[in-house]
Image (cartoon, rainbow, N blue to C red):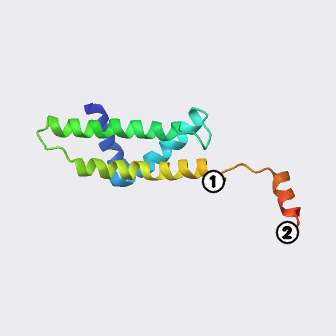
Amino acid sequence: MDTFLQFKTWIEQYSGLERDALHIHGALFLYILAMVLFRQSRRSRFPWLFVLGLELMNEAADLYQQASTGEPPRWGASLKDLWNTMLWPTVLLLIGRYTNLFQHRTRDAHRAKVDEPDR
């Protein structure tokens, strides 16, 4: 557990980014990584669940660390981290599932659409 917390601190110091920004960037990276590694489509819930699971484990580690040092749990900070982490993966999942914004279009399909007469 200490190694994980040291790793998080090292990333924060090395990147120069605030923890809130790291939650956002990390979530997008993990969401895309899960889509690629597990060969999931834009419509799949799995990458979203993958990011959620990792974020819940991260927050559990933070709360455990706070408890082990005698600090009271900072539930507000954990909820803020959860919000920062899950916002954009949620938006991407909803767009992927309920729109065709990310749908692959072939040149022929695009050409056929352009050649269609207006009705």
Q: Is residue 19 depicted above or below 43 in this figure?
A: below
With 25 as the anchor, is 75 left or right in this view? left
Residue beneath disc 2: 118
Mark 1 or mark 2, which is nearer the start of the sequence? 1
Q: Is residue 34 depicted above or below 102 in this figure?
A: above
Of residues 62 and 9, which is closer to you in this image? Answer: 62
Of residues 73 and 23, which is closer to you in this image? Answer: 73
| Callout 1 secondary element | loop
| Callout 2 secondary element | loop
Quadrant of the image occupied by residue 11: top left
Which residue appears farthest toward the bottom when viewing the image?
A: 118
Amino acid type at mark 2 = Asp
Measured as percent of width and height from the top left, residue 39 is found at 61, 34
With 67 as the anchor, is 28 left or right in this view? right
Q: Which residue is drawn at 58% across and 52% down?
A: 95
Callout 2 environment at 10 Å: few (<14), some (14 to 19), or many (20+)?
few
Amino acid type at mark 1 = Thr
Residue beneath disc 1: 99
With 103 as the anchor, is 69 left or right in this view? left
